[in-house]
Image: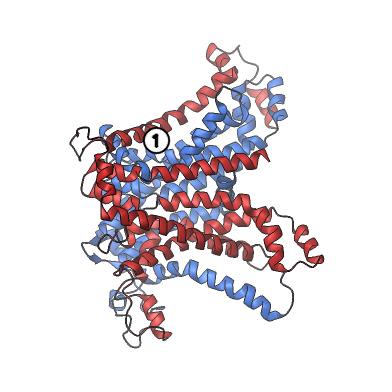
Amino acid sequence: MIEGARWRKWVFFYVPMALFLLFLLFPFYWMVITSVRPDGELYRPWNSTNYNPFWTWNPTWVHVRYLFEETLFASWLWNTTFIALASTAISLVCGVFAGYALSRLNFPFAGSLGTAIFITYLVPQTLLFIPLAEIIRNYRLGDTPWSLILTYPTFLIPFCTWIMMGYFKAVPKELEECARIDGASRWQAMLYIVIPVAIPGILSAGIFAFTLSWNEFIYALVFLSSPAQKTVPVGVTSELIRGDVFYWGPLMAGALLGSIPVAIAYSFFVEHYVAGLTGSVKG
Amino acid sequence: MAISAVSDTTLHEAPPPRRQRLLEDERWLAFVLLVPTIVLLGMFIAYPFIQGILLSVTSSRVGMRGDFVGLANFYKIFNDGIFRTAVYNTFLYTGVTTVFKLALGLWLAMLLNRNFRGKAFTRAFILLPFIIPTVLSTFAWKWMFDPTFSVLNWLLYHLGLITGRINWLGDPDLAMISIIIVNIWRGVPFFAISLLAGLQTISPELNEAAAIDGAKPWQRFWHITWPLLLPVTMVVMLFSVIQTFADFQIVYVMTGGGPANATHLFATYAYQIGIGTGLLSEGAAISLAMFPVLFLVVVIQLLYIRRVEVR
């Protein structure tokens, strides 16, 4: 695309691209290197002599072992997985049904209901967390995984619906009508004809929802209190810091291990994730 | 294929019971399909929203129902110096990061829109800051900004740019800059990938035709790419503005609102007052103070989407 001399390609493409990659990926490199570096090397002042911060010749597992032996990290991983999977499943069922109804059925107030769901998509968690904490307490859900499994769908359902509406609209009406002429009920036509066609959409919405609920922080921070119930982001934040002392080795190891499940899920479904991301914006 | 499977297995059975006949009616089916969504959103969005408003006009604390106090909480926070700083910070934070995220994101999207080796790979890696739990990656940044062990200080020192250490998170202005950098880092991938999707819908023939007519790259960008990309840009920007305006995690981890309450945003201050100190009503009032701005952005977004759809 870039015409002219070779140096132009370096100046306008390779150098900016390399700088972007460095800026965007360096923190992850730093996470990795910190989590395998012995404490003696970690806590050396930045201006000490002969110190190379970017590499270590003495990699160690002590930080990871500390995480699994001295903290509840394994429980946090399990809690986060369970909560993310359950809330994603609920949101997908709701989102697929609602998306189908809003995009393919005629009923009164369809338009305003669609707008209302779209608006809830834009409600940030930080607007409602204080009254919601009271409500969770009143329902006696506080400090249980259900406080999150039931509240995460509030920000997952709207965009699942949104993405599914896009996919359902693309399914031709004739396909459904054929099935109906053959004697299928509306319900059957939806379940066996329309939904299977929209499976890529369900995957996109699902993977996007899973990463969002894995990443959620403020609800988990406010609703959960006992260390054994916490999710990875909250557990790492609250249990690996004692007062002013940061255990940087275990902290970075926890950050790394807490990121790997989403990174793996993401790497399997990159295309679906990107479709979900851009679909959630474009609608 | 799917159609024949249905007709083989399920169609020639006894006449459907009443429940199924009801589902044949479009309105009933729609109602049944929408019930779970409406119940969940009603219980955990609409109801808390009303509760929040009710809470903000009382004097409730944790475990104690308060009395009606009218707008006293709002009056109190508007006269609170820390709240005013938080308001200023939130606008600054949202404004500055949005400009940078848009500029850098657009630049990155244009770079990614070329053909080069390892394109899919690069694109996948670039999204990492957006995928990885923000709290966890922010800890990596906090460690990089650590006053004593900062790798950034090491780098700047060895490049000969500084002689003493920079106390990134200890100085109010530097702390704000640090937080802004982290937010830009997290947001650029989202902008880049969304705008890339927009760029890919623009036919390359348009640009080629303009190039043949002698249009310079900058002119081509300004007169072809930018106008065609504008609808996507607007939506992405409004989404990002809402998320940034209501942001919590980055500030909570990086500074906790400090030093000396200089870097609070609406959300972190609401958390400190409502959950930290237990003054529920005041915290709810601080949260709700975000609402007018969010409402305005949502209205703009709805109007804009409608306009684009009508066209």
Q: Residue at x 59, y 29 (%)?
A: A191
Give neighbour class at mark 1: few <14, some 14-19, many 20+ (Cα, 10 Å). many
- Residue A93 visible, this orientation: no
Amino acid bearing label 1: Ile
Which chain is rendered blue in the image? A
Q: Quadrant of the N terminus of chain A?
A: bottom right
Task: Tell whether B216 sits left or right of B40.
Answer: right
Q: Secondary structure at mark 1?
A: helix
Q: Colour of chain B?
A: red
Q: Looking at the image, is B280 positioned above or below residue B151?
A: above
Q: In this orientation, which residue lies closer to the viewer: A72 or B265?
A: B265
In the image, taking residue A239 as reference, residue B239 lies left or right, namely: right
Chain under disc 1: B
Residue B45: percent from left, percent from top: 39, 35
Please name the residue shown 51% across and 47% down the image.
A207
The quarter of the displayed image where residue B225 is located: bottom right
What is the residue that sits farthest to the left in this orientation? B64
State the image quarter where residue A39 is shown: bottom left
Image point (39%, 52%), residue name: B247
Q: Residue A46: horizontal and vertical position, in percent?
A: 33, 80
Query: Looking at the figure, which quarter contains the C terminus of chain A?
Result: top right
- Picture quadrant of residue B1: top right
Residue that extends furthest to the bottom in the rendered view of this protein: A49
* Residue B90 visible in rendering: yes
Relative vertical location of residue B44 with respect to residue B202 in this rendering, above or below? above
Give the percent coordinates (x, y) of residue A57: 38, 80
Question: Which residue matches tag 1?
Answer: B45
Residue located at (58% from left, 64% from top): B108
Relative vertical location of residue B168 with respect to residue A89 in this rendering, above or below = below
